[in-house]
Image: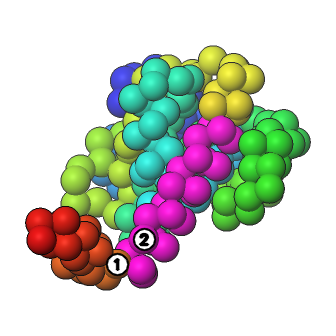
């Protein structure tokens, strides 16, 4: 995390000086920050969040800071504050006939436990993409996130169904092996 990213994130705290002092003492230590003033956060299950994060990165789509709470199995995507209405409309539109992916929207009145500026691999709270400066207010970030959350949830659901139908590699390949054996005769 850069100094500008640290300044932006700590500015969201109820007492920014205390927050910065807390992180100066231990840069790995998480800190509870109020959502809604400088940012909102959308949290999803870890499997959907990791897939959405990977797809957003791989495709070069707009993406703000992203954090993970490994113990709770959640991934949090930071959005511009007051994005809830647009996000929910876009998510519903992207979902169409499919179910809307399960998520929590944290805005005014909510707190998010933010990783420290120097989280490490074994920490419960980690940055997947730390803030490097104040994120630009981009409506495209909301669109990209809604689109990828729906796609990731659909993919994760299909993979789970496949895993139930074919619990082992042998079960998945049994039908193909039987057909290959029959063709060889």
- Residue 7: in sight, yes or no? no
Q: Is 55 positioned to the left or the right of 13 in the image?
A: left
x and y percentages locating residue 171 in the rendered image: 26, 80
Q: Where is mark 2, residue-wise?
A: 162
Q: Locate residue 105, reporting x and y percent.
A: 72, 55
Dominant SS type (magenta): helix
Of residues 83 and 144, the one nearer the viewer is 144
Residue 121 appearing in the image: yes
Classify 10 Å Cα crowding around label 2: few (below 14), some (14-19), many (20 and above): few
139 on left or right of 111: right
Viewer-side residue, 44 vs 148: 148
Residue contact at pointers 1 and 2, CB within 8 angstroms: yes
Give the Cα distance between marks 1 and 2: 6 Å
Q: Secondary structure at mark 2?
A: helix
In the picture, the disc for residue 166 is 1
Q: Nearer the viewer, residue 65 or 4?
A: 65
How far across and how far down the image is residue 96, in percent? Answer: 80, 49
Residue reaching furthest to the front = 185
| Residues in magenta, as a range | 145-165
Q: Residue at x 74, y 23 (%)?
A: 139
In the displayed structure, does residue 113 sit left or right of residue 104? left
């Amino acid at each position: 995390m850069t100094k500008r990213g640290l300044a932006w994130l700590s500015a969201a705290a109820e007492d920014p000086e205390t927050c910065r002092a807390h992180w100066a003492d231990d840069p790995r230590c998480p800190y509870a920050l109020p959502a809604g003033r400088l940012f909102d956060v959308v949290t999803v299950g870890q499997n959907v969040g990791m897939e959405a994060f990977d797809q957003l990165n791989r495709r070069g789509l707009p993406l703000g800071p992203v954090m993970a709470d490994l113990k709770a199995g959640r991934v949090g995507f930071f959005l511009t504050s007051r994005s809830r209405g647009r996000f929910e409309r876009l998510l519903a539109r992207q979902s169409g006939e499919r179910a809307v992916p399960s998520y929590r929207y944290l805005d005014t009145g909510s707190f998010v436990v933010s990783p420290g500026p120097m989280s490490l691999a074994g920490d419960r709270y980690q940055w997947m993409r730390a803030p490097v400066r104040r994120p630009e207010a981009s409506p495209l970030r909301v669109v990209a996130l809604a689109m990828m959350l729906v796609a990731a949830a659909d993919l994760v659901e299909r993979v789970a169904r496949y895993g139930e139908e074919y619990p082992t590699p042998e079960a998945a390949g049994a039908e193909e092996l039987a057909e290959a054996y029959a063709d060889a005769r």
